[in-house]
Amino acid sequence: MRRNKLWLLLITLGIALLLTACVSKPTPVALTPVEAAPATAMPISELQQAQVVRVIDGDTIEVSIGGKTYKVRYIGINTPETKDPQKGVEWMGPEAAAKNEELVGGKGVGLEKDVSETDRYGRLLRYVWVGDLMVNAELVRLGCAQVSTYPPDVKYTDLFLQLQREAREAGRMCGLTPTPSPSAQPSPPPCDCSGNIYNCSDFSTHAEAQACYEYCESLGRGDIHGLDGMDNDGIVCESLP
């Protein structure tokens, strides 16, 4: 009886060893590292490719996409006018247009959408890339454009504001160094309407605060600084002299 149990144990052990030898080990799979995209650039696959056929001014171009022509308005920035029949040619407008021509003229570009598809004039609203360079940001960095954001298209607002501060601190004016004559230089805006950055204590007089409020209203930003208080009567900072 004991001998039979011993033979049964040996047979069971042999079968187990045989099954173990027949099972093949899995072949390890080599993992190929993925190369990281540049920190400031969108992946090319996420950009709509277009060919620039005309530079209209500092912040507007005309492109060809699939054989059709579209006007493209740069998101988040504004440059001085050169073709507005009411404003005429503003100071630094030609320089901004020339810099835009230098950056994108005749080139293939990548178009990045934010939230809105078009503006009220039917122009495509896009961030424009040439390789790893975002043209919108570069124009601000060079002092050719000022920040002008309209929600909900605010993806790069913080970047634009940072570049604008750096350009102003460095005195960059789109390649211009001399101070323009008073007749050629437009009056500076009464305040910055790019975000909620003021309160009534930032103004010396009611007139200054009111001018800022009305200026931002004219740009379609409304009471972005909250200067009108709770009564919403259009008269701001009433406690100021």
Image (cartoon, rainbow, N blue to C red):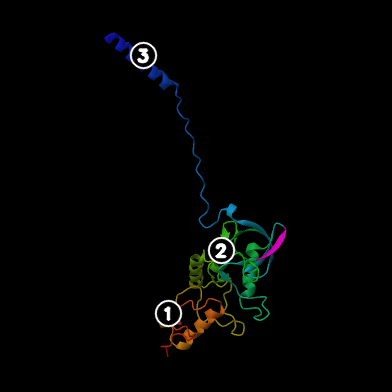
Disc 1 + disc 2, Cβ < 8 Å:
no
| Quadrant in the rendering for residue 57 | bottom right
Q: Is residue 207 rendered to the left or right of residue 53?
A: left
Q: Which residue is mark 2?
A: 115
- Residue 24: give x, y in percent of width and height: 46, 25
- In percent of the image, x 64 and y 62: which residue is there? 104
Q: Which residue is mark 3?
A: 11
- Residue 221: give x, y in percent of width and height: 53, 76
Front position in the image: 147 or 150? 150
Could you classify mark 2 by the number of other residues whose Cα lies within 10 Å: few (under 14), some (14-19), or many (20 or more)?
Answer: few
Q: CA distance from mark 2 to mark 3?
A: 73 Å
Q: Is residue 67 rendered to the left or right of residue 128?
A: right
The earlier-in-sequence mark between 3 and 1 is 3
- Residue 100: give x, y in percent of width and height: 63, 67
Identify which amino acid the numbered label 2 is placed on. Answer: Val
Q: Which residue is mark 1?
A: 199
Which residue range is magenta in the image? 67-71
Q: Nearer the viewer, mark 1 or mark 2?
A: 2
Disc 3 + disc 1, Cβ < 8 Å:
no
The local secondary structure at tag 1 comes to loop
Q: Nearer the viewer, mark 2 or mark 3?
A: 3
Q: Is residue 207 visible?
A: yes
Q: Is residue 49 rendered to the left or right of residue 199?
A: right
Q: For residue 128: magenta? A: no
Identify which amino acid the numbered label 1 is placed on. Answer: Asn
